Image: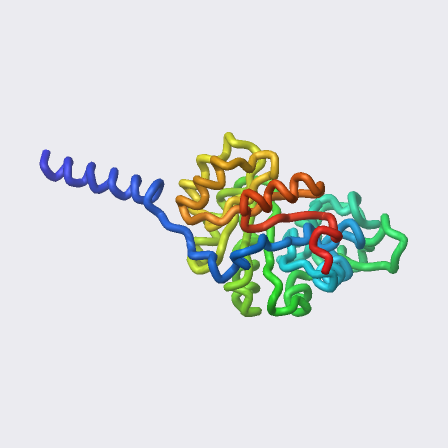
Amino acid sequence: MILFLLVFFLFIGVVLNHLFLWKPHNMTSFYDGNNPLWFAHRGASNAAPENTISAFNKAVKNGASGLEIDVISTLDGVLLCSHNFDLERETDCGGYIDELPYHRIKDANAALHWNSEREGLPKLKDVLRIVPKHVRLNIEIKSRSFYDISAARDVVELVKGENFINRTIISSFNPFVIWYVKWINPQVLTGFLYNNLDYFFMINVVHPDCLHTTAELVSEGLMKFAKQRGLALNAWTVNTKPAIDWLIDLKVDGIITDQIEFYST
């Protein structure tokens, strides 16, 4: 009986520690401290084809302090920058990225809906090699199901190999992706994306370093909670001046926006 009680209370202690006593990474060196980081959503997506080299270059040139990048893995494991699995939504190619090998996708035109030169979906590794050292990254791993976590290891290994660990947040709506990223490399900074308060409880399961929530869900109460827990808070996707001003007054850590004029210097 005594042994049973010891095991029982040990188990309860482990569960409580996992759920409530975890500590996120110290994000002080990642953020400015006085001003929010400006993450260009999919690059300068209101001025160039989203998630392309030209969009990322234009965002950096105009003063973005961070880039938000969507990543999907092809059937043969090539990490491409794209928000949509369905290629028809933004390119002249058909099919789904995760169901096709890279050679079937490499010639797709991501500038199809723009009056600009033809441009392909860039590999994540090529984007990392053009990003200046002062720019921070928020890499969102896209997945079509809770069990779709295969890209996580490749992203972590690439970020580490390119020496981006200390200036990259890996984020996802999929809590299993966040959990897997932290299991692969506990030093990686992570952000849990959510747009519904029904999923808020998941932060005590996946232990992110940042909360990535819609601007509509940001409140003084949420800011207080984040600061008490040592969590950074990045709001998305914020495209109006009143919302920007309100979030700055609340002292959010990062603002993700499509609008190049908000961070243009």
Q: Quadrant of the N terminus?
A: top left
Q: Quadrant of residue 167?
A: bottom right
Taking the spot 45% from the left edge, 38% from the top edge, the residue there is 202
Residue 162 appears in the picture as rendered: yes
In the image, taking residue 197 as reference, residue 204 lies left or right, namely left
Taking the spot 51% from the left edge, 44% from the top edge, the residue there is 211
Residue at the left extreme of this rendering: 2
In the image, taking residue 214 as reference, residue 110 lies left or right, namely right
Spot occupied by residue 227 in the image (x, y as percentages of width and height): 44, 46
Residue at the top extreme of this rendering: 198
Residue sitting nearer the eye, 52 or 134 = 134
Q: Quadrant of the C terminus?
A: bottom right
Q: Is residue 3 above or below residue 120?
A: above
Q: Is residue 242 above or below residue 131?
A: above
Residue sitting nearer the eye, 84 or 74 = 84
Spot occupied by residue 232 in the image (x, y as percentages of width and height): 49, 49
Residue 147 appears in the picture as rendered: no
